[in-house]
């Protein structure tokens, strides 16, 4: 074509089409983005508050992508807990590897009624207290699965309840330190009259003998003799020989008080059983505890040791998964 010659209309259309085709060929096509559909009970384990975990360590409980699909499957159709009323709480167990990790475990209680409306608050300094859950801003709350969160639900027919704590972390700075520590010492409480409490089996008394300085020790009346125990304290300079008889009488009084308290605890437990109806007894025996650990996955860089023990009130789980 001569320079300055005109291009026909048809020629222009062909040229534009060629340019557009070349442009499309050079632009990379974006891969379609896929989002994993949320599972119906995917956040159930997170809904269960890890009772007794320090607020300062809560974020560390969730720093790994823990796999609790087996918990979800147990509660879905075909699972061993499907259609049953279940109450769920969390516990964070510590595991040492290169550092201290917090491993979430989930305890599922199969029970027609809430296992307890109380919580234990225990510490070395304060001993043990059993208080209402609401005092620690805790309660059993119905769990709503993902598929039901955008519609009206029948609140009378919930099957899954989680133990939640409504204490806001942002408000902790306004609380006294002793009050904050109470949350750290919380332990899920369960009273089982058919299980002999460890208090009924205890043969150890704590001795704080008033002298200068005070004599502080422990005496086990089942495995030690008072005479040898006292002589040992004198030999090690913790007690003067002149105080021997007075000290022995003091210890005997402590032992008598401990025996009486142990006997009263046993009598009270047996009285509860005696006053229960047969239906209540059978319902109580049907209560089951299941302890779920995270499943092994590429996201978990540690070997988790499983134990059936829940706590001193619940004892051992019937099944560990």
Image (cartoon, helix red, strand yellow):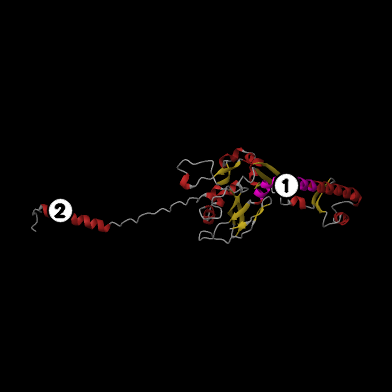
Q: Is residue 306 left or right of residue 149?
A: right
Question: Farthest residue in the top direction?
Answer: 174
Q: Which SS class for mark 1?
A: helix
First in residue order: circle 2 vs circle 1: 2
Q: Is residue 148 left or right of residue 123?
A: left
- What residue do we see at 53% from left, 56% from top? 70
- Mainly helix, strand or loop, the magenta region? helix
In this orientation, does residue 214 appear? no
The circle drawn on residue 13 is: 2
- What residue do we see at 63% from left, 56% from top? 318
**Residue 183 sits in quarter:** top right
Magenta stretch bounds = 262-284
Seen from the viewer's position, the closer of residues 156 and 300 is 156
Residue 291 at x, y = what percent?
Answer: 60, 55
Mark 2 nearby-residue class (10 Å; few <14, some 14–19, many ≥20): few
In this orientation, does residue 253 appear? yes
Whether tag 2 and tag 1 are in contact, CB under 8 A, the answer is no
The circle drawn on residue 286 is: none
Q: Which residue is mark 1?
A: 273
Seen from the viewer's position, the closer of residues 67 and 174 is 67
Residue 278 is a magenta residue = yes
Relative to 177, residue 19 above or below: below
């Amino acid at each position: 074509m001569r320079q300055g010659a005109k291009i026909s209309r048809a020629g222009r259309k062909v040229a534009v089409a060629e340019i557009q085709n070349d442009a499309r060929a050079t632009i990379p096509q974006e891969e379609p983005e896929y989002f994993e559909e949320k599972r119906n009970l995917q956040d159930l384990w997170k809904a269960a508050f890890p009772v007794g975990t320090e607020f300062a360590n809560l974020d560390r409980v969730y720093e790994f992508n823990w796999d609790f699909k087996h918990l979800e499957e147990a509660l879905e159709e075909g699972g061993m807990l499907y259609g049953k009323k279940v109450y769920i709480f969390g516990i964070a167990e510590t595991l040492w590897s290169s550092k201290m990790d917090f491993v979430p475990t989930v305890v599922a209680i199969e029970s027609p009624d809430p296992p307890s409306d109380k919580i234990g608050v225990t510490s070395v300094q304060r001993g043990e207290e059993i208080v209402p859950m609401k005092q620690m801003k805790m309660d059993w709350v119905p769990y709503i699965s993902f598929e039901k969160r955008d519609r009206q639900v029948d609140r009378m027919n919930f099957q899954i309840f989680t133990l939640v704590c409504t204490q806001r972390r942002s408000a902790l700075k306004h609380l006294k330190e002793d009050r904050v520590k109470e949350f750290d010492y919380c332990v899920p409480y369960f009273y089982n009259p058919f299980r002999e409490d460890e208090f009924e089996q205890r043969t150890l008394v704590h001795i704080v003998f008033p002298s200068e300085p005070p004599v502080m020790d422990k005496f086990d009346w089942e495995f030690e003799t008072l005479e040898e125990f006292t002589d040992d304290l004198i030999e090690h300079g913790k007690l003067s020989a002149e105080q021997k008889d007075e000290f022995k009488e003091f210890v005997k009084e402590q032992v008598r008080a401990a025996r009486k308290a142990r006997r009263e605890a046993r009598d009270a437990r047996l009285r509860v059983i005696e006053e229960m109806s047969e239906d209540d007894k059978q319902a109580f025996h049907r209560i089951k505890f299941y302890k779920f650990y995270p499943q092994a996955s590429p996201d978990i860089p540690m070997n988790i040791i499983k134990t059936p023990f829940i706590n001193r009130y619940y004892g051992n789980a019937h099944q560990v998964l």
